[in-house]
Image (cartoon, rainbow, N blue to C red):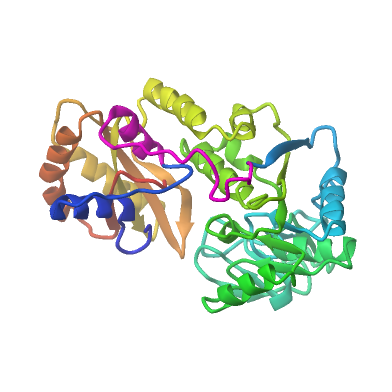
């Protein structure tokens, strides 16, 4: 939970289990590196399931479509479209995964280069064409689609990129006989899940198009193809957890294909087929990839081999947010083994008209970090002027 009260449900469950003296079961095909490291060290007991729930179901074959050599047409390659066509002809079902809702990530003016900005955030307004709106997925701002470019008056504005709405439209045009259903936050309500499951199991849907809402917890026996689009951004993200999350997500999506007696197939469109992540993924080798990532993390002094606390600040101006953090850093007690890094703007520097900055504190020793925070926290109340909102995030997962 990242908004309002911040907590890790996993860590709360473990703490609660310890209080009550009862075992806690953490179940996942791709556990976090923190949990996996605990299992490797013997602190947790590791129990592995060696086969799928249906014994005759084998893991799907994972194929990479190299975008350096195979061109895209409306976001799809020829092998991807052929796979969808073949699956449809066999009377089987497909999943097309694109983790980006909306029609397009932005609206673009080809004349002057204007790209729909959110006036309240350091983000773009996303085009939702069916609702005739531009929406910010960070602060919730909505506005009408402008009839012409606000920068130069050009009336010929273009969608930039592809979201699930546009992908659904593209597939409907290319495969007019297919019955397509889009699954994302814009289409689904709690009661709709039961109806969706009945429709898929009843053979009323040929292709599911969706975001991460489709990645976990669904068992569709006739779904034999999973097509994964546009995930390359995470391969070279500055977030050190990005590839861990991507591997988990890709394994979960791949796991939707071939869950019964029919063989499954997974196609991933990527411009980086030689990335090490894909070698482990094609072998369905989470333990191998986890060990490789843990070796990198140990070498770089990153979690789970070090502990972190993130002091976040929000203020009307970036100068005010940074000033609060700099004053807080000046009040930090000198503690052996604890490093206090320089205050920096947050990766998403502005949300809902508030500028955001952060200060990272790190230590290899949990006890030293806890003592540091215990002595440091009372000093915050003396910081003036009080123009910033602040929060302390222990073991942060998102920066």
The residue segment tinted magenta is 32-58
Is residue 349 magenta-colored?
no
Instruction: Find residue 297 and report its image quarter.
Output: top left
Give the dominant element type of the magenta stretch: helix, strand or loop.
loop
Judge left or right: residue 41 versus residue 281: left
Is residue 45 magenta-colored?
yes
In the image, residue 356 lies at what x, y percent?
40, 53
Along the line of sight, which residue is nearer the eye, 112 or 82?
A: 82
Judge left or right: residue 73 versus residue 267: right
Judge left or right: residue 380 versus residue 196: left
In the rendered image of this protein, does residue 203 appear above or below residue 50?
below
In the image, residue 244 lies at what x, y percent?
49, 38
Q: Residue at x 37, y 23 (%)?
A: 298
Q: How many marks?
A: 0
Q: Quadrant of the N terminus?
A: bottom left
Instruction: Find residue 129 and report its image quarter.
Output: bottom right
In the rendered image of this protein, does residue 194 appear above or below residue 277?
below
């Amino acid at each position: 939970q990242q908004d309002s009260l911040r907590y890790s449900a996993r860590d709360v469950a473990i703490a609660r289990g310890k209080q009550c003296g009862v075992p806690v079961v953490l179940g996942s095909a791709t556990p976090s590196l923190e949990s996996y490291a605990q299992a490797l060290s013997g602190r947790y007991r590791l129990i592995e399931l060696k086969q799928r729930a249906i014994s005759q179901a084998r893991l799907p074959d994972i194929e990479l479509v190299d975008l350096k050599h195979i061109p895209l047409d409306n976001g799809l390659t020829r092998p991807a479209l052929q796979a969808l066509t073949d699956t449809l002809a066999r009377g089987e079902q497909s999943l097309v995964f694109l983790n980006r809702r909306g029609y397009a990530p932005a609206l673009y003016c080809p004349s002057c280069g204007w790209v729909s900005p959110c006036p309240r955030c350091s983000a773009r307004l996303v085009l939702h064409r069916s609702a005739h709106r531009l929406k910010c997925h960070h602060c919730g701002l909505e506005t009408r689609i402008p009839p012409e470019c606000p920068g130069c008056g050009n009336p010929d504005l273009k969608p930039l990129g592809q979201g699930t709405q546009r992908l659904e439209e593209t597939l409907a045009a290319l495969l007019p006989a297919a019955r397509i259903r889009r699954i994302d936050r814009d289409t689904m309500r709690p009661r709709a899940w039961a109806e969706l499951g009945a429709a898929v199991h009843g053979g009323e849907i040929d292709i599911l198009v969706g975001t991460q809402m489709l990645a976990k917890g669904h068992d569709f026996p006739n779904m034999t193809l999973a097509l994964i689009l546009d995930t390359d951004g995470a391969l070279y993200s500055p977030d050190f957890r990005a590839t861990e999350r991507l591997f988990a997500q890709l394994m979960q999506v791949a796991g939707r294909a071939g869950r019964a007696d029919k063989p499954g197939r997974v196609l991933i469109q990527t411009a980086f087929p030689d990335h090490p992540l894909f070698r482990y993924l094609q072998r369905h080798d989470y333990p191998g990839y986890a060990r490789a990532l843990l070796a990198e993390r140990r070498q770089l002094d990153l979690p789970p081999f070090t502990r972190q606390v993130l002091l976040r600040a929000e203020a009307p101006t970036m100068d005010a947010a940074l000033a609060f953090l700099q004053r807080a850093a000046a009040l930090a007690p000198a503690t052996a083994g604890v490093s206090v890094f320089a205050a920096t703007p947050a990766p998403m520097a502005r949300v809902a008209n508030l500028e955001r900055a952060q200060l990272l504190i790190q230590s290899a020793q949990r006890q030293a970090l806890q003592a540091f925070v215990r002595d440091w926290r009372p000093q915050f109340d003396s910081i003036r002027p009080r123009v910033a909102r602040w929060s302390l995030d222990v073991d942060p997962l998102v920066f």
